[in-house]
Image (tube, coloured by chain):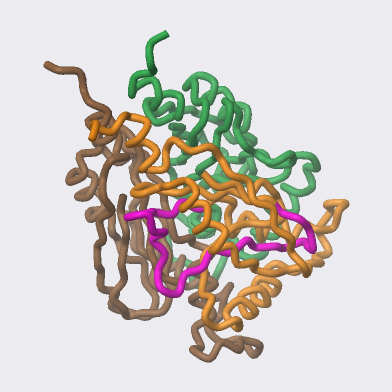
Chain colours: A green, B brown, C orange
Amino acid sequence: MNAPTCKDLLENMGYANKMKTIHVRTTTHAELLNVTNEVRTAVKEFGVSDGTITLFTPHTTCGLTINENADPDVVADFLRQLEVMIPWNQPFYRHAEGNSAAHIKASLMGFSLTIIVENGSLQLGTWQNIYLCEFDGPRTRSLFIR
Amino acid sequence: MNAPTCKDLLENMGYANKMKTIHVRTTTHAELLNVTNEVRTAVKEFGVSDGTITLFTPHTTCGLTINENADPDVVADFLRQLEVMIPWNQPFYRHAEGNSAAHIKASLMGFSLTIIVENGSLQLGTWQNIYLCEFDGPRTRSLFIR
Amino acid sequence: MNAPTCKDLLENMGYANKMKTIHVRTTTHAELLNVTNEVRTAVKEFGVSDGTITLFTPHTTCGLTINENADPDVVADFLRQLEVMIPWNQPFYRHAEGNSAAHIKASLMGFSLTIIVENGSLQLGTWQNIYLCEFDGPRTRSLFIR
């Protein structure tokens, strides 16, 4: 067997891939959409063995986070408390589109995630799932994976 | 043409660059300073073709985020609502410098961003711009890019 | 001296390492545990010269952030204000484990950090330290470093 080329090594580590774009459809005004399976599929397609994977969502009213999937009440409590913290209506909001709360919530979650891959497997904790956080839906949203 | 060397490949992907430091000046106590052009310039200088770019701000009272640039009211609403959530004065704050609110806001935004580059172009969404979030200005702030 | 191999170059940049797992013990219900020294040790062990290091915590009720270490009141004010924003008890919380507040705080901090390394040195600001944010302790927590 020949020694691995530089490109081989880089591909194994996930640094020689092209970006993959996934489109998802949210169905309500505010929701956490589980995209863990989509990310696992991309890791397999990329053939990443040991490295990191980068997720990025190119919007300003939705974000990305990780949280528990076992009990759906976690997500429900999460969205309700965010609504208490950042009310949809505030007397001082001036943004004409009326969705300033969604812009703020999205920045609080963030737009990118970096997750470690080891032996071809996404290194999430037992209870961790990856969520696209919709704060002004329903809409079609994009997720970039690299 | 010779096959690309390992260093060539790594440079194309943005993994063989040195860190670049940018200094910016904020002019008010709290503001979101648009640094998108500075980041685009760095991507060009680095010659990154397909990879990721890492931004990092080495402070504890300013952070980094992405949000909408089209309507300046988004940023104004954003800063006002953050002030409601994390008031500058709280009876229980003990930090002698008096800027605990700025420390908290900075952690909520985060100190690093990872953005994908594809065909030499920063993969931001149509409405996305990159902001340095000043919460205790005016000051001169640093932004590390790699 | 021979030209560096691809693997040499990748190792210098921190892209050819295996993930390291650190276990830490938190001692109270909510605390920011300083893990800066543990991360600096990993940078040395990895032999990263110029690149980035990725931190990730595989939990859903603790997160990662960066903040000031000089005055311990910063951390105390930080935790108290987060408790005001996201109270432990809310009449509408339904999650049976009763720790919804911890799940929300963890997502606000985030689960990963990307930090630049230059000349073998972690590029933190003068006042920046790295914290594991415990929101439902005391527990043993894991930190992945790559």
The residue range painted magenta reads C113-141
Q: Nearer the viewer, residue B2 or C1?
A: C1
**Relative to C67, B71 lies left or right:** left
Residue at 75% x, 54% y: name it: A77
Q: Residue C135 in magenta?
A: yes
Residue at 38% x, 11% y: name it: A2
Residue at 54% x, 58% y: name it: A108
The answer to which quarter of the image holds residue B100 is: bottom right
Task: Answer yes or no: is residue C39 visible.
Answer: yes
Residue lying farthest left? B1
Q: Nearer the viewer, residue A102 or C21?
A: C21
Q: Position of residue C142 (x, y in %)?
A: 68, 50
Task: Answer yes or no: is residue B125 visible.
Answer: no
The answer to which quarter of the image holds residue C86 is: bottom right
Q: Nearer the viewer, residue B111 or C131?
A: C131
Q: Position of residue B52 (x, y in %)?
A: 36, 40
**Relative to A57, A27 lies left or right:** right
C58 over C35 or under it: above or below: above
Q: Residue B85 in magenta?
A: no
Q: Quadrant of the N terminus of chain B?
A: top left
Residue lying farthest top? A1
Q: Position of residue C81 (x, y in %)?
A: 64, 76
Residue lying farthest front? C1
Q: Position of residue C146 (x, y in %)?
A: 51, 44
